[in-house]
Image: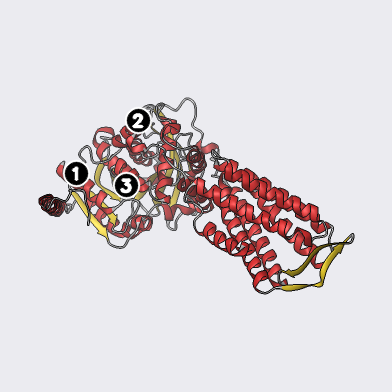
């Protein structure tokens, strides 16, 4: 019975540990209770039965505490489980010291594994509890397998009876030797793997910007776009000369601020009148200061979708980091007007960089967060940067109506990470926006951890446990329904003012982060305002791939805009599709009304189904 319960609980704990905090606490508590029961049951077989019973009792007490504590938090759960496992592991190591031969080795391996898991839980309680739950699941599963094997294939002890001081302490069946070794080695391997993964994820944080990113105080005189300093970046992309730049822009508060970025220049003789410029607006990389793309020049070709095509065409690429990335924060994540001003000023800064030979004619291209920034740059360009000449705006999966986007993404792990970044940023920017008003304590802990990390390499992996915490518990009040969060989201939806230049919207048909139907609604609204919009949908393409897949088409579209060709428009097709959708919706509503009328005539209430 004990073995069957262990197997069942272990499988469930590994496969479904993230449903809710109460379920997680109950599962971990039951796992502790089962482990303690197993220790107590086998205590008489050891040379120090009293110590084995102490270890079992510690595990049982920890399980009872986790089970009966009604208001336990995720951190407290990790601490309770960690203390129980650690003390049990130390007791088992003490038992191993009093034994000899194979028994000493087996007990030592079990004690070492438990001690590692306990230390791991105590070291990083906020994030490790989920990994701890999985490790408990594996251990409980193996424990259950061992108990089942002992019950189904009993092995007699050599003497049949263990006698101490004239009293019988144990006799009969024991776990088969291969099973005992398998359980011990597997448990230690799981503990070591968990410790290795946790250490690897926690030893590295976001890069710390150096003195280049420190803005002089006061800022030098000059308008927005004034170049403060520049330094070469070696071997960023073949056939280019790259520069890290610090320039003046306009911050969230409307005052001059320093913003960093990259300017990438093709080698060769510049054309008369200067090179054309691509203002690149990057997607989400994080909200911590160290997440600036210019701090990761080796990743430039991955971050800047289409870089090779732009360089081959002879364009200068001006890639802003945005305010608060690289330079001192906070970073105004998804605050469209700030990202737009930073992007427009990066074009001005590139124009002032002599080695770039950049002209004033430019196009904007960005994906995801960068798509939203690109659209806002198109909206602001004429009024904010009248000295520049915008020929086109290309936006890949642009963040559309933020309220609808937040509502949809609150159901997914990736979506909750993006919402967490936005809310962390907005709390620091807006005095009335407080996380405690809308998020649970668990979620606030996870949001703080996510906001401190970047979406690069191991940093991305390190954020996974915190993202899973958001699945355990998130908002006690939907942010998109609460103020000031709702108003902030509404203010940062693109497409509310006209864009004078043509617009290309590239969208993945299989995008789960920015769904295609939301982008189509955005395109229709822009068309209704008189914008020239072409929408290209790439079937079976997800969110992350859309920027890469569409970049050759984006480069060709931008080249046509620089060449002065008439921009194609999808507004007629979008309007026809909207009319068809409206007609289908009216037909569905009419059919529903007819069914309800028929039910009323039969005397069946309208709300009845079936």
Residue at the image position 16 percent from the left and 41 percent from the top: 529
Would you place residue 104 above or below residue 23 in this image?
A: below
Would you place residue 401 above or below residue 51 in this image?
A: above
| Element type where label 3 sits in the image | helix
Quadrant where the C terminus sits is bottom left
Asked if one can make out residue 227 in the rendered structure from this viewpoint, the answer is: no
First in residue order: circle 3 vs circle 1: 3
First in residue order: circle 3 vs circle 2: 3
Badge 1 crowding class, 10 Å Cα cut-off, few under 14, some 14 to 19, many 20 or more, is some
Instruction: Work out whether residue 103 or residue 518 is closer to the camera in this orientation and state it.
Output: 103
| Element type where label 1 sits in the image | helix
Percent from the top left, x then y, of residue 48? 82, 56
First in residue order: circle 1 vs circle 2: 2
The single residue placed furthest to the top in the displayed view is 218
Would you place residue 253 above or below residue 478 in this image?
A: above
| Element type where label 2 sits in the image | loop
Question: Which residue is identified by label 2?
Answer: 484
The numbered mark at residue 479 is: none
Q: Report whether 296 appears left or right of 355.
A: right
Question: Which residue is identified by label 3?
Answer: 371
Instruction: Work out whether residue 426 or residue 94 is closer to the camera in this orientation and state it.
Output: 94
Please say which color scheme the image uses.
Answer: secondary structure
Between circles 3 and 1, the one closer to the viewer is 1
Asked if one can make out residue 252 in the rendered structure from this viewpoint, the answer is: yes
Percent from the top left, x then y, of residue 271? 31, 50
CA gap, disc 3 and disc 1:
16 Å
Badge 2 crowding class, 10 Å Cα cut-off, few under 14, some 14 to 19, many 20 or more, is some
Question: Which residue is identified by label 1?
Answer: 525
């Amino acid at each position: 019975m004990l073995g069957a319960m262990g197997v069942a609980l272990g499988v469930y704990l590994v496969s479904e540990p993230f449903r809710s905090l109460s379920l997680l606490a109950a599962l971990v508590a039951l796992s502790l209770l089962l482990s303690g029961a197993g220790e107590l049951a086998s205590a008489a077989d050891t040379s120090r039965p009293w110590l084995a019973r102490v270890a079992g009792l510690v595990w049982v007490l920890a399980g009872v505490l986790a089970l009966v504590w009604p208001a336990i938090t995720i951190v407290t759960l990790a601490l309770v489980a960690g203390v129980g496992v650690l003390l049990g592991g130390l007791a088992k190591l003490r038992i191993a010291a009093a034994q000899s031969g194979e028994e000493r080795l087996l007990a030592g391996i079990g004690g070492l594994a438990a001690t590692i898991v306990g230390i791991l839980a105590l070291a990083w309680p906020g994030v490790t509890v989920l990994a701890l739950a999985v490790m408990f699941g594996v251990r409980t599963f193996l424990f259950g397998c061992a108990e089942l094997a002992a019950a189904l294939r009993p092995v007699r002890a050599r003497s049949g009876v263990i006698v101490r001081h004239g009293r019988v302490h144990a006799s009969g069946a024991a776990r088969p030797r291969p099973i005992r070794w398998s359980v011990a080695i597997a448990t230690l391997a799981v503990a070591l793997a968990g410790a290795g993964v946790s250490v690897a994820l926690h030893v590295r944080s976001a890069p710390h910007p150096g003195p280049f990113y420190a803005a002089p105080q006061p800022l030098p005189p000059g308008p927005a776009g004034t170049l403060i300093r520049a330094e070469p970046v070696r071997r960023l992309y073949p056939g280019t000369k790259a520069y890290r730049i610090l320039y003046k822009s306009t911050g969230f508060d409307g005052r001059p601020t320093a913003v960093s970025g990259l300017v990438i220049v093709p080698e060769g003789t510049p054309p008369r009148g200067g090179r054309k410029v691509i203002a690149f607006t990057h997607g989400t990389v994080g909200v911590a200061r160290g997440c600036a793309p210019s701090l990761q020049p080796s990743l430039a070709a991955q971050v800047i979708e289409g870089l090779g095509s732009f360089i081959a065409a002879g364009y200068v690429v001006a890639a802003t980091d945005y305010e608060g990335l690289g330079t001192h924060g906070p970073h105004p994540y998804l605050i469209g007007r700030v990202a737009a001003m930073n992007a427009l000023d990066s074009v001005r800064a590139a124009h002032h960089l002599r080695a770039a030979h950049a002209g004033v004619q430019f196009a904007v291209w960005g994906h995801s967060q960068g798509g939203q920034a690109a659209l806002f740059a198109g909206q602001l360009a004429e009024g904010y940067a009248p000295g520049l000449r915008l020929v086109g705006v290309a936006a890949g999966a642009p963040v559309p109506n933020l309220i609808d986007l937040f509502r949809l993404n609150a159901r997914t792990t990736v979506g909750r990470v993006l919402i967490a970044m936005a809310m962390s940023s907005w709390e620091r920017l807006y005095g009335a926006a407080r996380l405690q008003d809308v998020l649970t304590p668990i979620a606030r802990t996870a949001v703080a951890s996510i906001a401190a990390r970047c979406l690069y390499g191991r940093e991305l992996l390190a954020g996974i446990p915190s993202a899973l915490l958001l699945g355990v518990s998130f908002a006690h009040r939907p942010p998109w329904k609460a103020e000031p969060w709702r108003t902030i989201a509404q203010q940062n939806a693109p497409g509310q003012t006209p864009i004078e230049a043509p617009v290309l919207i590239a969208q993945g048909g299989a995008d789960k982060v920015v769904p295609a139907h939301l982008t189509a609604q955005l395109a229709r609204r822009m068309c209704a305002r008189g914008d020239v919009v072409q929408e290209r949908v790439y079937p079976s393409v997800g969110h992350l791939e859309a920027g890469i897949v569409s970049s050759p088409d984006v480069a060709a579209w931008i080249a046509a805009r620089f060449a002065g060709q008439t921009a194609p428009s999808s507004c007629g097709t979008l309007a026809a599709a909207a009319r068809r959708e409206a007609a289908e919706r009216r037909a569905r509503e009419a059919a529903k009304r007819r069914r309800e009328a028929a039910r009323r005539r039969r005397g069946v209430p309208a709300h009845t189904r079936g």
